[in-house]
Image: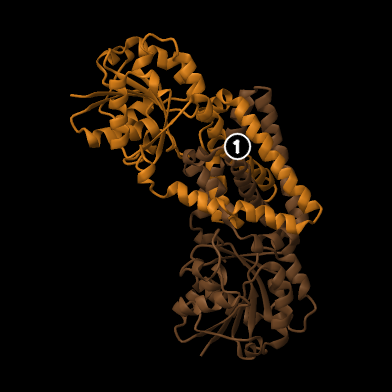
Chain colours: A orange, B brown
Amino acid sequence: MTNVYVIGIGLIGGSMALDIKTLHPEAKIYGIDTNESHLAEAIALGVVDAGATFEDLVDADFVIVSVPVDVALLVLPKVLDVIGDNSIVFEVGSTKMPICEAVANHPKRRNFIATHPIAGTEFSGPSAAIKGLFQGKTNIICEVEKTTFKLQEKALDLFKAMGMRIRYMDPKSHDKHIAYVSHLSHISAFMLGKTVINKEKDEQDIFDMAGSGFESTVRLAKSSPAMWTPIFKQNRKQVVKTLDEYISNLSKFKELLEKEDYDAIYNEMQSVNKIKEILNGMTAPEPSKGK
Amino acid sequence: MTNVYVIGIGLIGGSMALDIKTLHPEAKIYGIDTNESHLAEAIALGVVDAGATFEDLVDADFVIVSVPVDVALLVLPKVLDVIGDNSIVFEVGSTKMPICEAVANHPKRRNFIATHPIAGTEFSGPSAAIKGLFQGKTNIICEVEKTTFKLQEKALDLFKAMGMRIRYMDPKSHDKHIAYVSHLSHISAFMLGKTVINKEKDEQDIFDMAGSGFESTVRLAKSSPAMWTPIFKQNRKQVVKTLDEYISNLSKFKELLEKEDYDAIYNEMQSVNKIKEILNGMTAPEPSKGK
């Protein structure tokens, strides 16, 4: 019998629970959530088998910490305090430096593996959990050398069975790059939503004019503030840097428009068009690059 | 026999041609395109039946002008010069003031109906044309009173048969509102793509970390510069205004982050979360509001 504990049963933790149940039907999956209605919902939906407490973690094989990143800083050391020698614990949040620092000197550091499965959507809570979420997605693993080899293997076997590609990275590089490809996109979408909603106060009909383009660009503005506020807090310096660059690029585009330099505007857009090939490369399967 | 002429056979014109062929199998659909390979491709794909010239327009029932908005300013008066009394001409671009002004005093103004079907995507060219593109989409019609009643009816019957909801609006309001819900989204996506690509020059691995959220937010940066440069030119004043507001909102968010005012950051995001309901309302069918 494999005992799995999911602490915080939302999109990521819940989807992992569903995949583990499919891969290991004999596994017993326990949920721990401070939000009791989330726990009840997760049990009713069959995402987890039963509730549990921190004391129960002593017999855990896997512990998945999938809570907002500020909560993870408090929860993870407590989890490591309780688990046995053969438990592997992973945390799945969108920042990696603060969490790695928080457990750097913990006596059970080698039972922990720092991960970031790039599989989030704008949805949250147990009802957002879906089977197969991680198929073809990238899982970034930080400081892999700090985890006991046997437990690394156990975690990696699970991630690969879920269909994930593995990328290794140091926590600082992770936090720097993820600011560009994830955190900035969220702020861009939130502020686009704000700009249009502020206008809409006076003009009720404006959203009748919105098409799929607006919907796509603003989609991330549906994301949970409780999840995202601590991410921006923990990655503040990098996020401010990406925002500076984004605002500067927007201001330059605006100046070109004010100067009516349409050749330059055309060139700006054309040079960004190569994002097509980049995005295609991103979504295409890359078996030869998989580790 | 119904004779339909499509001038500029891309996503919008091509998709209209496909829908008309489905609705009226007896119709003869002609394509006019300065790009000869586009015309050949459109014929090969069955989007149009044959090529034609401006002189042929004399026997047109419908003429669809679906070219970049700067080209439309030149093409539309020439089309009106040639057509017969029973032709209805519509133009489908993303700006409406300049086109309405360009034909305001044309003797055949009453044969023209100014429309904006909100159905664009990031794709372009004849291969982007698809059947059923307009199902459930909004078509904004400007200055409807300036079109002969009989020809209005003919156009509206066609738009409704394609599945479109009709909204009436004056050209100035159209151009003002569309700057928020469409033009700004495109610049936001282009500049997000630019910010990340500039970074990627040094860091090849960054796109391995990008997930579906980035892909969604940056999607419109795949759009055609040849189509979008003249849109930004024609709607310059409104676009600059929306950009000012967007940049100001981003700068305020950055200041909150620099001041570490996380309560305010949480509230900013929470207040934009209502975009969920707005977007749901946008995509839900609204038969009672249809005209």
Q: Is B198 on the left-hand or right-hand side of A128? A: right
Residue B61 spot, x, y in % from top left: 59, 86
Of all chains, the one bearing label 1 is A
Q: Residue at x 70, y 77 (%)?
A: B75
* B163, above or below A245, in the image: below
In the image, B3 versus B33, the foreground residue is B33
> Split into 4 quadrants, where in the image is the C terminus of chain A?
top left
Report how many numbered discs are placed on residues in the image: 1
Residue A185 spot, x, y in % from top left: 57, 40
Secondary structure under the numbered disc 1 in the rendered image: helix
Residue B231 spot, x, y in % from top left: 70, 61
In the image, A83 versus A28, the foreground residue is A83
The answer to whether any part of residue A75 appears in the image is yes
> Split into 4 quadrants, where in the image is the N terminus of chain A?
top left
Q: Residue at x 46, y 68 (%)?
A: B132
In the image, A117 versus A147, the foreground residue is A147
The answer to whether any part of residue A45 appears in the image is no
* B145, above or below A157, in the image: below
Q: Amino acid at mark 1?
A: Ile
Residue B77 spot, x, y in % from top left: 74, 79
Q: Is A51 on the left-hand or right-hand side of B111? A: left
Kindly identify which residue carries mark 1: A187
How many residues crowd mark 1 within 10 Å: few (<14), some (14–19), many (20+)?
many
